[in-house]
Structures are given as structure tokens and as C-alpha cells.
Amino acid sequence: MNVSLDLTAYLKQNREVVDRALEKCLPTEKRFPGALFRAMRYSLFAGGKRIRPILVLAACDALGGDRENALPPACALELIHTYSLIHDDLPAMDNDDLRRGIATNHKVFGEATAILAGDALLTHAFQVLADVEGSTLSEQDRLRIVGEVASAAGASGMVAGQVVDILCEGDRAVDQPTLEFIHTHKTGAMIRASLRVGAIAGGADASALQALTLYGDRIGLAFQITDDILDLEGDEAVLGKQVGSDLKKGKTTYPAFHGIPESRRRARELVDSAVADLAEFDSRAEPLRAIAGYIVERIR
């Protein structure tokens, strides 16, 4: 890692870039019906790390691409991520009371409005992707990005992983392939898509796209393994949500399957391989290298 890169400052600066873009693309609470837009904005601006949109921008930057082409998909991925959190927290799913240190959406606005706020964020993401104003990307690349996002968010990606996760709750006979499926789809698919859409926006050739895809696959899995560990060992005040909930619900997690020491080793191995995947890139990919390390450093 290049020690000259201040990752904390980098993440803060780019989180602000993303937040400004999200502010522009989401209607204000003054628009009717205000209850809907309040609920949407409540969760969207609840203080998330913006890792997925930052990865989009970092991938584009690594190729020397135009960030203006990367910002709409970056925003779209964060809108979809936020919708997924709202729905995950619902009583029918994980039934959580806290998210990012504040009450979950359904606790504030009621279950019906929370469901609809999530629906609205999901569909608004594709409205953002459809807005071509200011984009210099070709029509073909814009369609590729839409396809990537839809595939990662839907029945081939995040939703599939969530369904299998729910079906496997309390099942002690879950095998390794099923565990991998849950992790690579529920969390990994959207992180993978972040790298791929950033690469497409940055004008990646086949070799660069493949390298960034491999990087995304590895850090996506490392990210979920780390989250599994943090659910057991994390500080609730820092995480902003209840710890130990996965264990109580009988969730299929890496620590439950392999134990914490092996989970730590696997996460570190994945991150080391992810950094190696970036060998063909120059110093413009330094933020990606640093973010890979940050993912597992959250464990400490």
C-alpha cells in the first residue's frame, strides 16, 4: 500500500462527493407525498460509508475515466443498497430495531411506508441510470451498466442470496457451497457490480474489466466474512446495530461454519489476492488497494 495515501481523508472526501450527487438526484421532502420522501431520505442519509459508490468512482479513476460518467451508476448502487437495508430490517426478514445507530425505517415510519420507501429507492435507481444528460458514454455502455446493476440486484444476485440466507436459518446441515452462494450473492454481487460498472464507465478493455471483476469478487466475499466476525466481536456503539443477532437467528455465517481464526485467515487471503489482481494498474489504483486492506482492518 502506498503510505502517502490518506485513506481516511480519501473516503471522507469521496463520501461527500457521493452525498452531494445523491442529494441532487433524490426529490426533497417538500414533494407530495412528503411521508414517502421523508422515509426514503431518512435511510439514505443515515450516515452510511458509501463503500459501493466509492468503489465505482475508484474503479473509474484507476482507468483514467471521466467521473461524471461514473456518478449516476454510483448513486444508483447506493439507492439499491439502501432499499435492501430497509427491507432486510423488516419484521418479516431480520426484524432489527437499529441501523447505523438510529431506529430502523419501519420503526419510525411503519412497516407499510418502509416497504414502499424501499420499493421507491429501487425503482428510482433505474430512473437515475436512464438519465443520460451529461453522459459521454455510448448507448451500448449505458445499457451494459443497466444490465450489470439489474443482474446484481435481482434474482441472479442479491435477492437470490437473501432468499437462500432466510431459508437456511437454523439449518445446521448447510454445506460449504451453499455458504459461498449466500455470501457471494447477498453481499458480493453488488460489490462486484460496483467494480464492473466503474470499469465500464472508465472505458476498461477486456483485460482491465476481468482484473477488476476478480478484485470485486474477492473483496465482496472478504467484506461479508468480516461482517460475520463483527457481528460476534464488534462494538455495538461503533457498528450502529445490535451484535450477536446472526447467532441468535441461526444464520449461516463463516464463523459459525469455520470458526473465527479460520474466517480471519480466509478474509486476509482474499484481500491479498485482490490486491494482486490489480498488478496491471498504476498508482491511480492505489485507493482500490487501500480499500481492500480497510475491509479486513475493520475486524481489529
Image: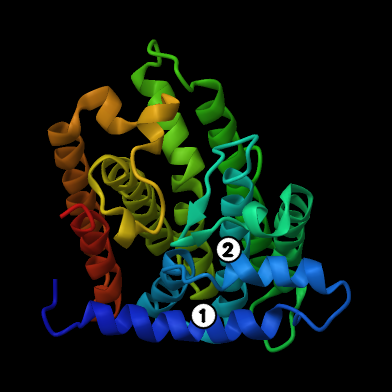
Occupied quadrant, residue 183? top left
Which labelled disc corresponds to residue 77? Answer: 2
Where 243 falls versus 69 (above or below)?
Answer: above
- Please name whichever residue, 259 or 33, is drawn nearer the observer in this view of the structure: 33
Depicted 151 relative to depicted 102: above or below:
above
- In terms of secondary structure, where does tag 1 sit? helix
Left or right for 109, reference 231:
right
Q: Which sits earlier in the primary sequence, circle 2 or circle 1?
A: 1
Which residue extends farthest right?
32
Relative depth, front residue between 259 and 240: 240
Q: Which residue is mark 1?
A: 18
Residue pictured at 56% horizontal, 36% vertical: 162
Task: Give residue 95's position: percent from left, percent from top.
Answer: 56, 39
Check disc 2 and report its element: helix, strand or loop. Answer: helix
Drawn side of residue 136 relative to residue 217, left or right: right
Which residue is at 45% across, 30% downward? 181
Amino acid beneath label 1: Val
Q: Residue at x 53, y 35 (%)?
A: 161
Instruction: Mark yes or no: residue 288 visible.
Output: yes
Q: Quadrant of residue 156?
A: top right
- Give the amino acid at mark 2: Leu
